[in-house]
Image (cartoon, rainbow, N blue to C red):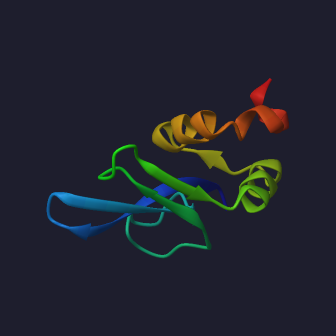
């Protein structure tokens, strides 16, 4: 089973709120997920990002691939620099 670290959209129309989750790559965007890693709220200024760093690093070490957007968030938070995938 290939896993992805990706965003799951919540919130009202034009008021998005995202949960950062681990999901099977075949699952729907807002469907079944394995574990919740934190959240991302782009509506605030500046955007609010709250992640469980230990869980994120653990899943990256297990081979989970972040999506492009999550990859940018992880770089901004400085998490990818602490893993072996940063090389």
Q: Residue extending furthest top?
A: 87
Nearer to the camera, 87 or 41: 41
Q: Looking at the picture, does residue 49 appear above or below residue 1?
A: above
Q: Say whether residue 64 is visible.
A: yes
Q: In which quarter of the image is residue 76?
A: top right
Residue 22's x, y, as percent? 60, 63
The picture places residue 40, in percent across and down from the top left corner, at 45, 56
From the top left corner, tell me how far across and down residue 32 is, in percent: 48, 76
**Nearest to the observer: residue 72 or residue 27:** 72
Farthest residue to the front: give it: 45
Q: Position of residue 87 (x, y in %)?
A: 80, 23
How many numbered callouts? 0
Q: Residue at x 71, y 55 (%)?
A: 56
Relative to 45, residue 51 above or below: below
Residue 40 drawn above or below residue 69: below
Name the residue: 39% across, 66% down: 28
Residue depicted at x 39% and y 43%:
46
| Snapshot quadrant of residue 50 | bottom right
- Quadrant where the N terminus sits is bottom right
**Taking 21 as reference, is 47 left or right?**
left
Is residue 21 among the parts visible in the rendering? no
**Which residue is rendered at x = 61% and y = 73% of the image?**
34
């Amino acid at each position: 089973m290939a896993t992805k670290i990706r965003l799951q959209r919540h919130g009202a129309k034009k008021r998005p709120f995202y949960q950062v989750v681990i999901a099977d790559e075949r699952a729907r965007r807002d469907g079944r997920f394995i574990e919740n890693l934190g959240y991302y709220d782009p509506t605030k200024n500046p955007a609010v990002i709250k992640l469980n760093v230990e869980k994120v690093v653990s899943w990256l070490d297990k081979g989970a691939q972040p999506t492009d957007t999550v990859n940018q968030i992880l770089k901004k938070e400085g998490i990818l620099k602490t893993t072996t995938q940063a090389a």
